[in-house]
Image: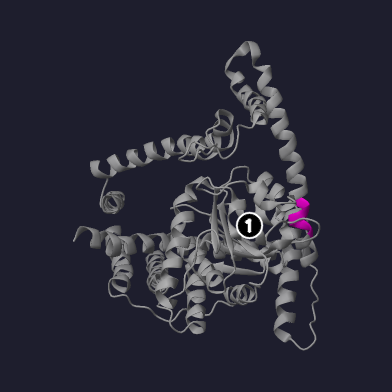
Amino acid sequence: METATVVFAGIGTLAIFSFLIKENPFYRFFEHLFIGVAAGLLPILTIRNLLYPNVIGPLIGADIQVFPDGEIANPYNYWNLLFIIPLIFGLFYYAVFIPKVSWLSRLVIGISLGYSAGLSIKGFFAEMIPQVLGSFKPLVVPGSIGDSVNNSIFVITLLLVMYYFFCTFKGESTAHNGARYTGRLLLMVCFGAFFGSTVMARMALLVERIQFLVGEWWTAIF
Amino acid sequence: MNTRWIYILILLTIGIPIGFKLALPPARMPVAEKLFSVVDNVSNEKGVAFVAFDYGPGTSAENLPQSQVILEHLFRKRVPVFIFSLTPISEPFLRSVPEDVAKQLEKETGESWQYGKDWVNVGYRPGGGLFIQTLAKSPNIPEFLGKDVKGAPLSSYPISTRVSTIKDISFLGEFTGLVGMFQTYVQYFQADGYVPIFGHGCTSITIPEAYIYLDSGQLNGLLEGLAGAAWYSDLLRDKYKDREPDRALVSNTALGVAQLVVLGLVVLGNIVGWKQRR
């Protein structure tokens, strides 16, 4: 089974790469296959990994272990019946398709929005405050020219980029326009770094696929 | 020019180092080195490590070697590890990576690594930030997590005796290429002012973003794409002399050569374009 999986994965990889030569039915078939698998995978994973072990299983007592001699490891926990309440409440989402009771869906959406907003506010402060504090750097670090230069570059870049975004008014001053221009240039340097690393990431994917074709796939075939 | 010539050139550039297993020494990556020293100082006397594999086949080219080297380092140091994920598609990796690492170490050292004692697979956990926050605040983490991926109660494994609250988590490792996933841990994996030592493995695309967190001290170490994993692998070889070279070094060589060719093509394209415009 494992060999068949490897062989099929290799054929799929070659099919997708065949697009580099030209559009062809072999590529088209595997493209549709991939879309179908991706669409089907998510509901199955949700049922198997989320709904069944966490809700349906405990509700119907499927998590109760029965030993070979018939003894039961743990009795049915009747408190599990309470899972029905959140289960029904969650199903209210689908009320959006029934005009008469569509207001029920707003209850669930409202609660989801409420907790998401609360969670986000907390998360924002936990994430951002250390970063704001981290941006206060000494421009002169005694005994380390390297750190002093690094910190100065950091602070100047931070100020100029912030100036570019916040001071968007039209001005005749050379200092104002120069600061905005430099801020824009520094942003371009950042985008260049992002672009370079994106190319590297895409290339890493290709390296992995070729490694798979040359290694596992070739070995499985021959 | 027919672009297919470029595809063939890139194919050969990557295929030759992989086919002949050419492994050049990787470049030094200071932040990966920092992560190595952080993991090397994690105590195996008490506490556990939590490692999240938040990746799927789409980014496994970079995240898989990263998670392998970190797990190997933790296993070698005998730090018990809880493995989990916030992404359902990571399921095969949650199972195969620790098993493969344990097998490789058993072959090399003759010692054994056991499921339930040295690691446990908690599986995919839904809920994202809500799950992480509840886990961090839980007074009894094994009880909160309930069961492992096999359906067995976590309390039945010896590893569970080493952890009750977040303060017993001495190291948190997270590997992902998904936007926003890593930030979930930065935001919520903390309680009562305690934040575990945090190491992150990112894909090359997210390196510039991850550096911000490294700079602010929210991250204690970082593996930058495949290059970070290759350097970490080299550091492991320096420390454990019997260790066999792994695939990360060959992949990194192929990647480096391909990058050089792309760089050369960019320069060449600009020169030709400049000449044509004149």
Between B217 and A76, which is closer to the camera in this rendering? A76
Q: What chain letter is assigned to the residue under label 1?
A: B
- The relative height of residue B48 versus residue B92 in the rendered view (above or below) is below
Front-lying residue, A158 or A15 = A15
- Is B254 situated left or right of B190 in this image? left
Asked if one can make out residue A110 in the rendered structure from this viewpoint, the answer is yes
For disc 1, the marked residue is B160
Quadrant of the image containing the C terminus of chain A: bottom left
- Specify the segment rendered in magenta: A124-129
Horizontal and vertical percent position of residue A66: 50, 38
Q: Nearer the viewer, residue B44 or A220?
A: B44
- Identify the residue shown where x is 63% and y is 70%: B221
- B114 is higher (above) or lower (below) than B88: below
Decide whether residue A126 is among the magenta residues: yes
Position in image of residue B254 (x %, y %)? 37, 71
Residue lying at the far top of the rendered structure:
A100
Q: How many marks?
A: 1
Q: How is the image coloured?
A: one colour
Magenta span dominant secondary structure: helix
| Whether residue A169 can be seen here | no
In screen coordinates, is A38 left or right of A74? left
Residue at the outermost front position: A69
Which of the two residues, A86 or A137, is positioned nearer the viewer here? A86
Within the magenta stretch, is there residue A153?
no
Q: Residue furthest bottom?
A: A143
- B146 vs A215: above or below: above
For label 1, the crowd category at 10 Å Cα-Cα, with few meaning under 14, some 14 to 19 and many 20 or more, is many
Image location of residue A121, percent across then percent down: 77, 46
Q: Amino acid at mark 1?
A: Ser
- Image coords of residue A1 (percent x, y): 28, 49
Relative to A144, say whether B38 is above or below.
above
Numbered disc 1: secondary structure: helix
